[in-house]
Image (cartoon, rainbow, N blue to C red):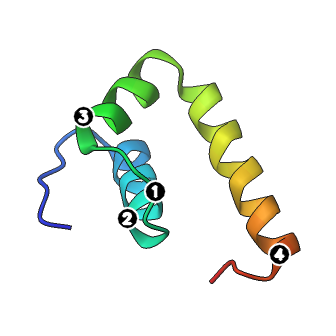
Amino acid sequence: MNECCLCGTSVAMRTLYRTRYNIPGSICSDFCTTTWCLMCSVCQLKRDIKRRKELGIFW
């Protein structure tokens, strides 16, 4: 990913997911989202995974 992450697994997981599926953003936005609204971030990932599974594009 060519980005350094020293801020925990939640940010790393979000960054990896975003990178894997070519979702626009940055590690800075991932950090801000997980820092100020962790539950929103988790719900957003869960919702996106569910949608991708329904479409058959989750790998």
Q: Earlier in the sequence, mark 3 or mark 2?
A: 2
Residue at numbered disc 3: 28
Q: Tags 1 and 4 in contact by the CB under 8 Å rule?
A: no
Q: Tags 3 and 2 in contact by the CB under 8 Å rule?
A: no
Mark 1 residue type: Ile
Relative to residue 33, is residue 39 drawn left or right? right
- The residue under the point 49% across, 69% down is 21
Mark 2 residue type: Thr
- The residue under the point 53% across, 20% down is 37
Marker disc for residue 23: 1
Q: Secondary structure at mark 3?
A: helix
**Alpha carbon of mark 4 to alpha carbon of mark 2: how far?**
19 Å
Residue at numbered disc 4: 55
- The residue under the point 11% across, 53% down is 4
Mark 3 residue type: Cys
Q: Earlier in the sequence, mark 1 or mark 4?
A: 1
Q: Secondary structure at mark 4?
A: helix
Label 3 Cα crowd, 10 Å radius (few <14 / some 14-19 / many 20+): few
Relative to residue 7, is residue 2 drawn left or right? left
Above or below, 42 relative to 15: above
Residue furthest to the right: 54
User: What is the x, y in percent for residue 55?
Assistant: 83, 75
Q: Earlier in the sequence, mark 4 or mark 3?
A: 3
User: What is the x, y in percent for residue 45?
Assistant: 63, 49
Q: Of tags 4 and 3, which is closer to the observer?
A: 4
